[in-house]
Amino acid sequence: MFKGFKKKFIKVKKGKIFCKIGGNGPPLLLLHGYPQTHFMWHKIATNLSKYFTI
């Protein structure tokens, strides 16, 4: 899942945010809602990473 993506924690004032980053091209932010997780993007993120940095 998320082959070629790197895991990263971004420090913010009140904690940290987990993300996965991969691909090439202009940035594209994929957000999930509650109660979903990043897993909901695993199929489309791989395809979009051909054209965008996810």
Image (cartoon, grey):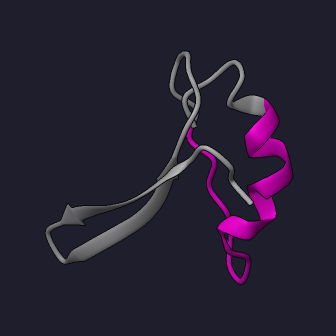
Up-down relation of residue 15 to residue 45 (above or below): below
Up-down relation of residue 23 to residue 10 (above or below): above
Q: Residue 10, image x and y in percent? A: 28, 59
Front residue of 30 and 21: 21
The range drawn in magenta is: 29-47
**Quadrant housing residue 36:** bottom right
Seen at 77% across and 56% down, the residue is 42
Seen at 81% across and 33% down, the residue is 47
**Which image quarter is the C terminus in?**
top right
Looking at the image, how many numbered discs can be counted on the residues?
0
Q: Residue 11, image x and y in percent? A: 20, 64
Q: Residue 44, image x and y in percent? A: 83, 44
Q: Is residue 11 left or right of residue 20?
A: left
Q: Residue furthest right?
A: 43
**Quadrant housing residue 4:** top right
Q: Is residue 43 magenta?
A: yes
Q: Residue furthest left?
A: 13
Q: Residue furthest front?
A: 4
**Quadrant housing residue 1:** bottom right
Seen at 69% across and 53% down, the residue is 2
Q: Is residue 36 magenta?
A: yes
Q: Is residue 37 left or right of residue 10?
A: right
